[in-house]
Amino acid sequence: MRLLVNFSKKKGTAPIIAQAVKDTGVLINVERAVIDSSEGEALIEVPDDQCKLIRSTMTRLGATVRQLEHGISVDQSECVDCGACISVCPREVFSFDADYRLVVAEDKCVLCGKCIPACPHKALTLPV
Amino acid sequence: MHKSIETINERIRDGSARVVTAEEMPAIVSELGEEGALKEVDVVTTGTFGAMCSSGAFLNFGHSEPPIRMERIWLNDVEAYGGLAAVDTYIGATQQSDTLEDQYGGAHVLEDLVSGKSVELRATSRGTDCYPRRTITTELLLEDLNQAIMCNPRNAYQRYNAAINTTDRLLHTYMGTLLPDSGNVTYSGAGLLNPVTNDPKLRFIGSGVPIFLCGAEGMVVGEGTQHSPGGGFATLMVKGNLKEMSPDYLRAATMTGYGVTMYVGLGVPLPVVDLDVVRATAVRDEDISVDLVDYGVPSRSRPVIRSVNYAELRSGAIEINGEQVRTSSLSSFRKARQVAAELKGWIEKGRLQLALPTRPIDPTKKVHPMHERKKGPRVLDIMDRQFVSVGESEEIRAAAQKLLKGETNHLPVIADDGKLSGIVTTFDISKAVANPGKAVTVKDIMKKKVVTTTTEEAVDIAVRKLEQNNISALPVVDKDRHVIGMLTAINLGKLFGGRWLK
Ligand code: SF4
Ligand code: SF4
């Protein structure tokens, strides 16, 4: 299960992810993290059965945690199956099937957004 | 054996013509042999669906009351050409909206019209005795126009170079997003389905030949601009009735960092009259090679990394220096197939018959670059030949003094071998002076990664380097990396002295 964790540094400088790993013993996979001086956002992957525990631990540590149901989404009415998105995605989310139709492995997406400007037809959006 | 085009058209009329797409042809030829294929197949249909920037449409609005001679014309805020007659215009696909910039352009206007949406026409005029009206603003539908004739001066490229980027920067080009350090390869074109690739000698593609254009029956006008079949890059000028087109095959697009363009579906039917046609249409993706070109070099003659064929490109990754680099197509092979299949359906149903060109297109012509009689400014024209430099092992204080004396903000740093090794700015030195004790010599504080230019580089390229790196000076180096001058924002001011900007 993927969780989007937002934390503000104003609430202290505790290393939330490390603390949560230490407190719960759950191994967290950090897929993407953007952290600047005042706030941070991390996309993490945790085992489904421990999701609740991680959520409550991190919330207690001062983070806002949101579960991500979806990866990148493709507007089928705009997509022309050109494939311009395929090679720019670092997680190989996109590929063609045998009929040269775009296939999206949504579960691999880490929501980095790199594919969005690469699509000439504005068919790609990140879930909000 | 030779089959006449009349025989083929007769079969089309009585519904017995055997029509196949160019994708099916290689297998048919290997199964039946060339003679067998000639006997069996009457028409091969081709198709492509990709970005064709050089597209647009002539529109005639009819006269208003009182009438106006439109001089400046906008459709949904996209300016259209006003130098035609009173109520005619040409709207180019790549023209961008005055307000929405690359988010909306001529291509979007055309797609909106074809999709049945209304478009705002706004025009201004000086007013004349015969055309007194000075402004007009109204809403129009495609059906309200007298004519809407798509005319694409340069379409249906025979093939297109593949692109890569060897620089360390992400590039946004008309070839799409190119990742740094050769991180990906992009390419365009339908390979074995491409119209001209199936008739490279242009025997059956010429003026008057009926084609599929964005879902409508169009025709070839003649050779396209920049037509260069001698180098494998033939182009066609085509036209068709916008009113009959479909948004399935006409799609506006934006290439980030480049601008608006239009995806066009185009297909040409080829009559299988003799063995030469059979051989040409049996072309496979692996037979069609293009150059893989480095778009990191901003010059007309970009370096070629290697030659690649469409089979490799379409496989998803190609090998470069022992590494697998992923490929992305910019044009849609699926849609190209749809074009070829729909055209095939038209012919099978007898809706479209074939015609020989009324005028042939030269299959040998080669395009030549611009004859520039006046060269644009180069770095050597405006650089500072007199400049102050500093040695790596000099003390920071000495560098500070040089900066002051030289009235400059940048000091190139020269190593013991006389070559450029770094650069220090006023900021680096102030920082060092403000935190004394940490650094002693220039070497300790200099930036080692220096963006440089050469005497021969075009000023426009040097200016982009300054902008992209957010810096204000470039050392000018020779091939041995000896500094021979400096180019700063101040030198650029010379350009505006009137010498170059006439
Ligand atoms: S958002 Fe990033 S990971 Fe997800 S599909 Fe786009 S490029 Fe791939
Ligand atoms: S780049 Fe856009 S239009 Fe092309 S295949 Fe990807 S999502 Fe579809």
Image (cartoon, coloured by chain):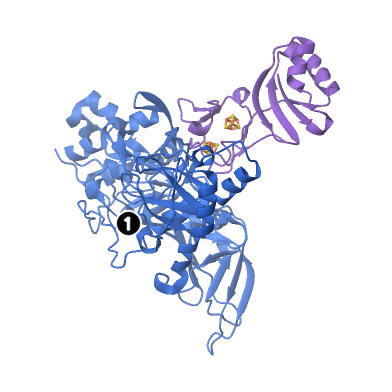
- Residue type at mark 1: give it: Gly
In the shown orientation, is residue B451 left or right of residue B380? right
> Horizontal and vertical percent for residue B156?
36, 49
In the shown orientation, is residue A63 left or right of residue B374? right
Q: Nearer the viewer, residue B98 or B172?
A: B172
Q: Nearer the viewer, residue B182 or B175?
A: B182
Q: Nearer the viewer, residue B292 or A23?
A: A23
Chain whose colour in the figure is purple: A
Residue lying furthest right: A60
| Chain containing mark 1 | B
Q: Quadrant of the N terminus of chain B?
A: top left
Q: Nearer the viewer, residue B265 or A3?
A: A3
Residue lying furthest bottom: B129
Classify residue B498 by image quadrant.
bottom left
Chain whose colour in the figure is blue: B
- Is residue B414 placed above or below B326 in the rendered structure? below
In the picture of the structure, the residue carrying the numbered disc 1 is B224
Mark 1 residue crowding within 10 angstroms, few (<14) / some (14–19) / many (20+): many
Classify residue B33 by image quadrant.
top left
Classify residue B105 by image quadrant.
bottom right
> Horizontal and vertical percent for residue B295?
39, 44
Evaluate whether residue B293 shows in this view.
yes
> Horizontal and vertical percent for residue A48?
73, 14
Mark 1 element type? loop
